[in-house]
Amino acid sequence: MKRGTLRVKAILALMIAVLVGIYGGAVQASAAAAGDIPEVVEQVSASVVAIIGKPSEGEERSTNRFNLAHGTGVVVRSDGYIVTNAHVVKDMKSIVVVTSDGKSYPGKTTHFDEKSDLALVKIEATGLRAAEFADPADVKVGETVVAIGTPISFALRNSVTVGIVSGLERAVNSEYQLLQTDAAINPGNSGGALVNMQGKVVGINTMKFVDDAVDSLGFAIPVDTVQYVLDHFFTYGKVMRPYLGLELEESWEAVVGLPSEEALQVAYVDPDSPAAEAGVKQGDVLLQLGQSSVRTLVEFNELMKKYLPGQSVTLVLKSGGETVTHDVKLGEDPDGGSEWVQTSDGSYIDTDRGKTRIGDSHFGWSLKYPAGLVVAHQSEEGDSVTFADAKGEFGLHVSVEEGVSKDLSPAGLLRKLSAKTDNLVLEKRYVEQGDVPYAKMTGKTETGSYYEMRAFHKGDRIYYALLFVTKEENYKNGFKQNMYLDLLDSFRLSFDDKDESLKDISVYKEGGTTYTNDYGLSFDLPHGWSESRYLGPMAYTDEDGTMQLKVSVTSASSGDTLERWTEREEQRFADSFVETNRRIGSWHELELAGGIPARENRFSYALGDEWKSIHAVYFIKDKYKYKLELTFPKKEEGAELESLVRALTDSLSVDKDRIDTRLGFIQDENEMLNPDRTVTIRNGKYGYTVRVPETWESQDDDYGGDVSAFATYTFTGGLFEIEADDGGSFEDTVEGLEKWYKESAENDSKFRYETSDETVDGVPAKKFEIVYPKKDEPYRETVYVFANDGIVYTVTLRLSDAVRTEANVKRLSDAFQSFKLD
């Protein structure tokens, strides 16, 4: 479909959805029923602040002046230190803190800890009222609590809701225990205070379940965890978490919340970690940490809060059926206490301050940019953008249709415009005024909304500008109608790059595209590359398909290293091809973004006269092995190819925040597969059994099945196939093959074959041996034809010369020798 061909009805539906979705939310009210609540609120409010700022540049519409993130904070020191949730200020820029008396202060994040979801924000202020913390032992289930925060909208700051402590020691997607409450906690309440009736903080609100069937279910970080993190912040500058080097796995009962008597199992031991040095092994079961038994990961993390790096802890484990004790000197968790600090960037919270016009530099258009105009949606190509009014009164849609005739007449432009709608048309005409004439159409929708659409023709493009007014009273209001038309009249087919008051929303860029997956991996590929479902998951190809990139992620086994892994990969490649048809380069060490060590090498192979190369990059990060294989014709090697490789490796990075939280252990099948291990296949309908290597790929899900007439197994450069025919004869099959081979030899002098008589499992057979040194892939093939009980069997063994290793020849021969008739 050509760009810009959306009809008015579809565009209006999109704009209505945008307006309703952004501005149609409702704020849930809550009731209070305790007589001393006003006194508590008055006591605590001065310690609660609202926080607002710009989200990171990587977020959608981050440059939109209305795209703001907000949350809540609690003053913990009178000199301007405020505790909040880490997720509130993570990557937040241009932070502004507003105190309960309405004063605003620029803020900066000074301390940050994602595991506890706590952070500190500093403002330059003195004499603030610091909150008072409750004694953790005094927090009781059923006691009344008050939540103070900034829900839904920043305009609702210092909102108050009331409830009770619904539960203690909860574990919901957190490394530590949480406090449960039924006080209403909505988006924006995060980082706010949950206080008791003495006005003391019992927790910092952190999240709420959002579900149609779930209500009054919120959570807070309990005061003991808050005090633990704050103590570390002010003492060490970060949370000093101890490090064992273990990946622990809970029992099924613990995962679903049942009481469990099963202990934690060691699923992984980091090489060279304190646990590994102490002798802890994968498969051990952790019975005690110090003097305490432990059954869940949350219990384990709570116990570890008692220790610091450098201290020793006693582990009691069950290993190999015996109970063993290890004294482990704890290291420092490399991912435990973030030293990340986001200082103020000095920019104004309104990133569009001073911008009075907006447009697209690539497509060459612009219009006025009033303060209430929001970029609500933009297509990936940038040829379509929808603006919404901050008050929800109107929408504006601009689209570009390319590839039209440069000779389009005014009548032709009107016809193009008419095809955009089947709604009621009130006016339609060609307007010859201004620098560029345009076709104009106004109308009314079935719901009573009004629209005006204009079409401008320039070169091989048509620019459509559609204004949509939601309510009839607004459209008929003379003042507002003039405002709407003034915005539409400001549309120009030009973009002045030198105009600093002009905001550019073009998504077009020279160069490549950044791809990011659920394994946290990001990398850049040149313009024109795209994902290829045909090649499998995480596969990409260039425009003409000559180059492909495949990405794989698997778990690193305990004790494995990058060097050992890459040595196995090299050996696996070497075993796949004969020496004359393979080339292996030298290993190069490199360092990726974030200091990740990596290794790269180039492997080349030829099945015929055409050589292909694979540039492979390997690295291990956080227990996962990442492999990228760029495949291309070897003749493409040169400066341009090397530039592509370097751009790819330079862009490689892993962001743990982008890793899917459900990501678990991913077995590397290459570590388990034995190329000589076989599986037995029985075909009941055609009466035979055969054993084939399990590394061969079957064309059937069940390795040939029980009734299939064809069983085909392939591997690089090889094929093993069994065809069973219960409708033909041995003589006809042999005659047909002989005729085919004879014609092939007559047509191609390189094709040669020989026939002989053999016996297969006691049954007479005809054997054909074919040699075909063709240019693209020379191969040798052996075909056996024999019959039993009215069934004719044709068994084919094919092997390319490039992979004709002793091991491959033996595997094919062994598979055929294993063939047995029932």
Image (cartoon, rainbow, N blue to C red):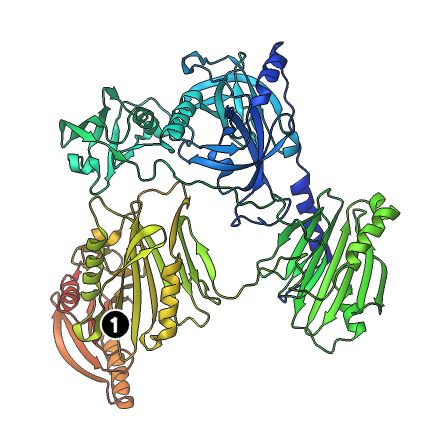
Q: Is residue 785 left or right of residue 189?
A: left
Comparing 490 with 400, the one in front is: 490
In the picture of the structure, the residue carrying the numbered disc 1 is 605
In this rendered view, identify the residue nearer to me: 158 or 316: 158
Whether residue 580 is situated above or below residue 223 in the rendered picture: below
| 626, above or below 21, in the image | below
Q: Can residue 479 be seen? A: yes
Image position, residue 679 (x, y; %): 20, 54
Q: Based on the displayed image, in which of its 4 quarters is residue 257 positioned?
A: top left
Residue at image location 46% in from the left, 70% down from the top: 543
Dot 1 falls on a residue whose secondary structure is: strand
Residue 331 as seen in the image, left or right of residue 357: left
Quarter of the figure with residue 688? bottom left
Left or right of 413? Residue 547 is left
Q: Is residue 681 left or right of residue 529?
A: left
Vertical relation: 702 (above or below) 171? below
Q: Position of residue 168 (x, y in %)?
A: 43, 19
Name the residue rendered at 70%, 66% in the picture.
494
Name the one closer to the observer, 424 or 551. Answer: 551
- Horizontal and vertical percent for residue 583? 22, 71
Give the residue drawn at x 31%, y 75%.
634
Which quadrant is home to the N terminus? Answer: bottom right
Residue 501 appears in which quarter of the rendering? Answer: bottom right
Judging depth in this view, the residue of 327 and 185 nearest the camera is 327
Question: Is residue 533 among the parts visible in the rendering?
Answer: no
Crowding at dot 1, Cα within 10 Å, few <14 / some 14-19 / many 20+, comes out as many
The residue shown at (70%, 54%) is 11
Query: Residue 746 location in percent, x, y?
Result: 26, 90
Picture quarter with the C terminus: bottom left
Q: Residue furthest top?
A: 35
Residue type at tag 1: Tyr
